[in-house]
Amino acid sequence: MNMKRRDFIKKSIGAGVAVSAALTFGNSEKLLGSKLPGKINTDYDIVAIKGGEPDIMLRKAIEAMGGLGKYIKKGQKVLIKPNIGWDAIPERAANTNPVLISELVKQCFNAGAKEVNVFDNTCNEWTQCYKNSGIEKAVKDAGGKMVPGNSESYYQYVELPKGTKLKNAKVHELVLSSDVFINVPVLKHHDSAGLSIAMKNLMGIVWDRGFWHRNDLHRCIAEFPLSYKPHLNIVDAYNVMMKNGPRGISVSDVQKMQYLLVSTDIVAIDAAAAKIFGTQPEQIKYIRIAADELKSGRRDLENLKINRITL
Amino acid sequence: MKSRFLKRFRVFFSVITLLIFSLIFLDFRKIISSSFYSYITYFQFIPSLLKFIDSFLLISSGFIIVIILTLIFGRIYCSFLCPLGVLQDVFIYIRRLFNKRRKNKFHFSKPLNWLRYSLLILVLVLFIIHNVFLLAWIDPYSIFGRTVTLYFKPVLILLNNSIAEILNNANNYFLYKVPLIMPDITIYFIPTITLILILWMTFKHGRLFCNSICPVGAILGIISKKSLIRININRDACNSCHLCERECKAECIDIENQIVDSSRCVACFNCIGICKSSGINYNFNIGNNPKSSEHDKAVNVQNKLSAETSYNNRRFFLKNSLTYISGFLLINKIKANESNSPAPINRLNPVTPPGSLSIEHFTLHCTACQLCVNVCPTKVLQPSYLQYGITGIMQPTMYFNIALCNYDCTKCSEVCPTGAIKKLSIEEKLIEQTGIAKFLKNNCVVTNMHKDCGACAEHCPTKACHMVPYKDDLVIPEVTENLCIGCGACEYACPAKPYKAIYVEGNKVHQKAQKPIEKEFEPKQNKEDFPF
């Protein structure tokens, strides 16, 4: 335990950034999302794009958000968290689109990132997920690094003081040591949670998912972003798994919808993605809890500033 | 010069054999494609024989080639191709390093014929009455596999993990940590006894194991008595210096009587290498050996035959008693709970790997070499302890508390050298039903906590396990049995405590599941570009 903490402090000092400093002094709430107040003010709450290829839509969306430079400073360490949960080919849309991830890694480097790391705590055997999802190759070709998330020793215990059900978790060390955290889920049907989008994707940065399942899944999903909120969420809704989610059976579960959403508000982006899927946001329990009860984001899309772009 | 060459060639060849076999049992990073494994294990005598008896396929004809090679060259199998033989040579070499003079001090000993032939007959009889367990315990290839898997591999993984720790801290992920899965301690019982026995035998008497216990050694020993080329003492050149006898790890050179017992000679060529007077050679049989060996052989065969018949008469009795013992020792026989409170899983049949046809076929052909355990990408396959009864100890079974069986993976069926797991195509695997998931409502999170969970349905690859409406807007799992393939994804994912709420009941005989339903659906059409 001592050893780990020492390592951790060393790493934090090495990174030399505000977020790490805040952590070292014991206030985990200051992490990530709340770290750069004011700087993440975009003109739009959500940028929604339809009709292009994943990489082109991403480029346009980031442009519309005002460039990645708003979120990434030169020399920073960036973490991208796609959904790589399943040993499935890209066409099955069980994982985030590798073309999108490749473009995002490149954009991060263009914005001045020193290193770009990608990982997921997968459901299927992790090396096969990394490989068959096409994400490993996409990331490596773009100059990023795939990081394993298969061993408990990569995860560190953190308190989640704002949680009522979820009071602590073991979170991947990269989430703690990175300067910028970008959440890149794929929109898909989900048997038990209703839909898997941005908030649900964060289950892949913790070690013990079983605890969430045992202790009110929806509330845990809603509570976790109170403490660990990504700087940016990008929802891949290019190919969408419409049924048999989250794993899916075959490509027959998939519909090509060609959407992409970008937002800093993890609740709003989930609400918008739900609408694309054809579900009302209030039908998804964790969106309701997060928006109405915890107020960690908004689901009243009609009152938000949304930039709608059709290519 | 030529004589030295033979030994050097043997050492070179055997080192390669050892390296390749160690690699396939240690390769936790899957560097070698598993499609090569069947070529590597092709010559392994017992696996090849078992596979041949089962399928009569050319692919499993390795043992025939070994027999032919033995007829020509003697037991070169034992020094060139048998990984356990080479491993014993390594033990002997290590022992020699601790010797002050760095020399071997073997001496001729009488053959333990009663032991090697009675074991061979016992193995044969047990096989006839449908049991493979003794064979599995003494088959040299399987002993090698287990020794490497149970002792060497954990050490390698621990080493990997400590180096990975350092590299990972330096932000280098060339090596990554691999979870160390240690099987139940009871599994170590037999391999440990075997290893100690082999160590003792090699330290004291060289290749005694090969010449007293090993069934392959016994069979090839009989054949090598007839071999064309063999080690012969040239009585004219031999000056009885005993160098070769001391060097002979098979302890089969009797210089006093100028005899080489070719049934025990493992063709290591050490004797030729050390002889200073060309008194011992590897050449065509010139009938130097006394005829008594022929006589010995005839007697042995007779003994064997008579013993076999008497055993055969008793086979039903033996079979029944063995079944009784194994049934008595079966675990997981806890009575089902009738009340509504959570109850432990009561698995009646273990789940065998896909392609193994039935529990009976699997347990009759598996020699527990652990190759499938090593190749399994998810690590769901692990050696059993008493799931198949005491006679099936170490034969692998599925451990769904560790992992799930990967939906479109056929690795174990590709590599199995004995035919216990038959090769499956991906299409066959996708509907190969090894067991059926059973839902225990009383243990479920949804019932007990009154909250949504659905981890089981999330992981199900065929949607045999899916969620259906329950009280108050909640959903609860349901299993469509004919879609279930018994992969255990649901059981693995189930977070319920203290007992899992869904488990796979093994199929005694594997069945074909229905193909997953691929329903066309009405594509969603948003009226406007953006529905918000």
Image: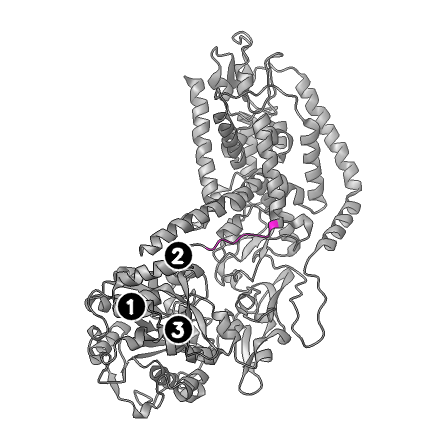
- Which is nearer the eye, A91 or B61? A91
Quadrant, the C terminus of chain B: bottom left
Instruction: Measure the C-alpha gap from mark 2 to mark 3.
Output: 27 Å
Q: Nearer the viewer, mark 3 or mark 1?
A: 1
Check disc 2 and give the amino acid type: Met
Query: Which percent across, then down, holds residue B411?
Result: 49, 54
Query: Which percent across, then down, holds residue B36?
Result: 45, 46
Q: Which residues are magenta?
A: B179-185
Query: Callout 3 environment at 10 Å: few (<14), some (14 to 19), or many (20+)?
Result: many
Against B61, residue A33 (above or below) is: below
Instruction: Please identify the residue farthest to the bottom as the structure is shown.
Output: A302
Query: Which percent across, then down, holds residue B366?
Result: 61, 48
Query: Callout 2 environment at 10 Å: few (<14), some (14 to 19), or many (20+)?
Result: few
Residue at which label 3 appears = A202
Check disc 3 and give the amino acid type: Leu
Instruction: Measure the C-alpha gap from mark 2 to mark 1.
Output: 19 Å
Query: Which percent across, then down, holds residue A200?
Result: 41, 76
Residue at which label 2 appears = A3
**The quarter of the displayed image where residue B118 is located:** top right
Q: Nearer the viewer, mark 2 or mark 3?
A: 2
**The quarter of the displayed image where residue B306 is located:** top right
Q: How many marks?
A: 3
Discs 2 and 3 lie in a common subunit: yes
Residue in view at x 63 percent, y 35 percent: B215
Q: Earlier in the sequence, mark 3 or mark 1?
A: 1
Mark carried by residue A21: 1
Mark carried by residue B199: none
- Which is nearer the eye, A28 or B274? A28
Against A213, residue B130 (above or below) is: above
Magenta part, dominant SS: loop
